């Protein structure tokens, strides 16, 4: 989602008011984000939380095919 929007991890961190390493750790599956952090990530991607979850679900569905 971040790359499709041509954003850097730093862009997402700054916009979502997250630590600079957080987006990369989330992308690599190195953490188990709390709902509050997911809201911040979605905000950093300029998305609503529902849209964020739909895109994640769509990506998992596509990977299973």
Image (cartoon, rainbow, N blue to C red):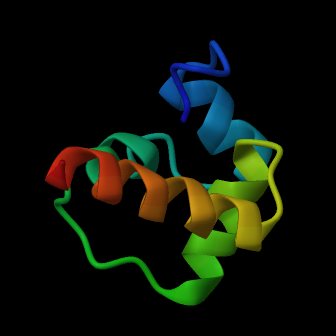
**Does residue 53 lie above or below 13 as drawn?**
below
**Does residue 4 lie above or below 36 as drawn?**
above
Q: Quadrant of the N terminus?
A: top right
Residue at coordinates 16% horizontally, 54% vertically from top-left? 64
Q: Give the percent coordinates (x, y) of residue 28.
A: 20, 46
Side of 62 relative to 12 (left or right)? left
Closest to the observer: 14 or 28? Answer: 28
Q: Residue furthest front?
A: 65
Residue at coordinates 34% horizontally, 40% vertically from top-left? 24
Q: Residue furthest top?
A: 6
Closest to the observer: 17 or 60? Answer: 60
Residue at coordinates 21% horizontally, 46% vertically from top-left? 63
Side of 47 relative to 29 (left or right)? right
**Does residue 29 lie above or below 46 as drawn?**
below
Q: Give the percent coordinates (x, y) of residue 48.
A: 83, 63
Residue 28 shows in this picture: no
Q: Residue furthest bottom?
A: 35
Total count of labels = 0
Q: Give the percent coordinates (x, y) of residue 14.
A: 71, 39
Side of 23 relative to 24 (left or right)? right
Residue 65 shows in this picture: yes
Q: Give the percent coordinates (x, y) of residue 3.
A: 51, 20
């Amino acid at each position: 989602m971040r790359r499709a929007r041509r954003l850097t991890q730093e862009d997402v961190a700054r916009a979502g008011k997250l630590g600079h390493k957080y987006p990369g750790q989330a992308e690599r599956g190195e953490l188990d984000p709390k709902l509050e952090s997911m809201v911040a990530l979605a905000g950093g991607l300029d998305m609503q939380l529902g849209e964020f979850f739909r895109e994640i679900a769509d990506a998992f569905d596509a990977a299973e095919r």
